[in-house]
């Protein structure tokens, strides 16, 4: 490679790394997205042939047209999807886009593996087979994750002998990989391998409960990155190696971080079928049967909020479903005008993907300095006058600390129960994504404010401003 492409790749790498760094904070996340996108655009425009020449300068008219067409279609479809998708459906879009990336990496690797030039290069062939397997797994698994997040496959799907079937599939995949390394021209073996990889991706995600989909998406995202890096190694494309390695490593670290936030090992997420069946629900319901909750009306709740000194708001997926983030901001501003100190407590796995609540609140222009992580707000909770829980469920459930039989026991939670008064906004007493009852709702200091979160918050804002 001559010096010009090398310098361009170095610049692209810097933009990728800078983009991930800036994504660490809501204040700089938009700039991080733009930096990474600029790096990808430069990498596409600087696309070069292994001989060192830019593909745009070669005489491949059809190929240049095809590349430009793919680039235009991708940019157009991506922009339409980003602008049209609702914030509540953002996790589904992330799963879908990640799956498409894995599928693309698998297709590139599959086509390249079928080239006769690689028959005498077992290292390159092994790298391409790895990309086919991991990319196909990510494609199929992300599709199942999308359907689970969309509510089409809500419960984990398990059956007797499932682990044995998965184990046999994995052994068959490994055997076929060994066979193809010595017989790369065998089309039937290659097609069977691709089919088994897709099946394994589906089989891996089906038994996992919906509450663990954020972790699964993060892990599959790292798989996609590894597939892209393997493609880059085989194709001698440094930009793909850098981008894939960054995605793979950051996705793995994020997966471990979320599992740590739930106090659960990765193997338990992947093989524990968390949130499945009646057993989980029974564990959470057994001590709550017949216990009443204490309802509260909007005017009473507004009076408590308006006369408080410190208020903590804990947003959850219910806020996202109701698209009530702007009403939450209005309530925070109305309380701030009365001298009330307002904080937002953000749990790492609240919502359906990492940072889901941060994205929603940032969209509503909630000041960043009001957003507090769980570790910061928990020590202050005993001094909080009112804790307002909006659609959150499992991340404030005291069973995680107090009930060893609960499926979420040991999961770090926001200590909402320690506040002087807890007001919970919910449509009904339905369970959360983990499928268990919330013991917080039955505490003496808890009050239930039933109704649509958006309409209820608007009535709270009106009442606070009028008080």
Image (cartoon, rainbow, N blue to C red):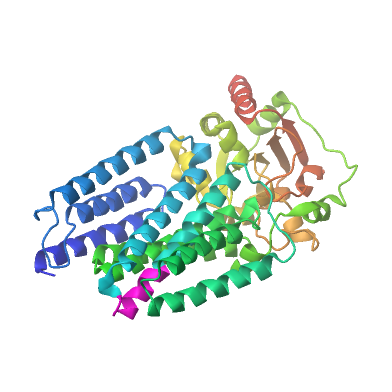
On the question of residue 58 being in view, the answer is yes
The residue that appears at 30% across and 58% down in the rendered structure is 16
Residue sticking out furthest to the top: 466
Which quadrant of the figure contains the N terminus?
A: bottom left
> Does the stretch in magenta take in 323?
no
On the question of residue 263 being in view, the answer is no
Of residues 288 and 457, the one drawn nearer to the viewer in this rendering: 288
The residue that appears at 53% across and 56% down in the rendered structure is 141
> Does the stretch in magenta take in 126?
yes
**Which residues make up the magenta segment?**
119-130
- Give how far across and how far down residue 40 sits, in percent: 26, 53
Classify residue 236 by image quadrant.
bottom left
- Give how far across and how far down residue 211 sits, in percent: 64, 52
- Give how far across and how far down residue 416 sits, in percent: 69, 48
Classify residue 80 by image quadrant.
top left
Q: Is residue 335 left or right of residue 251?
A: right
Q: Is residue 176 left or right of residue 39?
A: right
The residue that appears at 59% across and 49% down in the rendered structure is 350
Magenta segment's dominant SS is helix
- Does 136 appear above or below 465? below
The number of callouts visible is: 0
Of residues 422 and 218, the one drawn nearer to the viewer in this rendering: 218
- Does 302 appear above or below 319? above
């Amino acid at each position: 490679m001559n010096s010009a492409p090398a310098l361009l790749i170095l610049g692209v790498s810097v933009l990728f790394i800078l983009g991930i760094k800036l994504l660490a904070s809501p204040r700089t996340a938009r700039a991080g997205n733009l930096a990474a996108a600029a790096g990808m655009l430069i990498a596409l425009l600087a696309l070069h042939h292994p001989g060192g020449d830019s593909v745009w300068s070669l005489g491949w008219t059809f190929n240049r047209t095809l590349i430009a067409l793919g680039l235009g279609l991708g940019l157009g479809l991506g922009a339409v999807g980003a602008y049209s998708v609702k914030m509540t459906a953002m996790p589904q879009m992330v799963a879908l886009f990640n799956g498409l990336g894995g599928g693309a990496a698998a297709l590139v690797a599959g086509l390249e593996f079928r080239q006769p030039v690689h028959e005498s290069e077992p290292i390159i062939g092994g790298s391409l087979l790895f990309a086919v397997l991991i990319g196909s797994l990510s494609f199929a698994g992300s599709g199942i994750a999308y359907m689970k997040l969309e509510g089409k496959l809500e419960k984990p799907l398990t059956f007797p002998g499932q682990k044995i079937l998965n184990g046999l599939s994995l052994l068959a995949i490994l055997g076929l990989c060994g066979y193809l390394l010595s017989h790369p021209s065998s089309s039937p073996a290659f097609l069977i391998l691709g089919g088994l990889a897709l099946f394994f991706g589906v089989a891996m995600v089906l038994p996992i409960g919906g509450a663990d989909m954020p972790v699964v998406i993060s892990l599959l995202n790292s798989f996609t990155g590894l597939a892209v890096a393997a493609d880059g190694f085989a194709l001698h494309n440094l930009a793909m190696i850098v981008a894939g390695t960054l995605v793979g490593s950051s996705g793995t670290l994020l997966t471990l971080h979320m599992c740590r936030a739930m106090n659960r090992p990765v193997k338990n997420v992947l093989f524990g079928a968390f949130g499945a069946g009646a057993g989980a629900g029974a564990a959470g319901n057994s001590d709550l049967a017949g216990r009443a909750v204490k309802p509260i009306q909007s005017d009473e709740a507004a009076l408590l909020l308006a006369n408080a000194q410190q208020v903590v708001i804990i947003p959850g997926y219910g806020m996202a479903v109701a698209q009530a983030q702007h009403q939450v901001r209005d309530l925070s501003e109305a309380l701030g005008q009365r001298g009330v100190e307002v904080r937002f407590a953000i749990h790492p796995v609240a919502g359906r993907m990492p940072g889901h609540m941060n994205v929603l609140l940032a969209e509503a222009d909630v000041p960043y300095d009001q957003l507090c992580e769980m570790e910061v707000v928990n020590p202050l909770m005993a001094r909080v006058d009112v804790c307002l829980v909006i659609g959150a469920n499992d991340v404030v459930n005291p069973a995680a600390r107090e009930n060893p039989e609960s499926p979420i026991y040991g999961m770090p939670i926001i200590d909402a129960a320690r506040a002087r008064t807890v007001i919970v906004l919910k449509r009904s007493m339905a369970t959360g994504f983990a499928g268990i009852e919330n013991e917080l709702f039955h505490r003496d200091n808890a009050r239930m404010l039933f109704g649509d979160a958006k309409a209820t918050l608007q009535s709270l804002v009106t009442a606070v401003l009028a008080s």
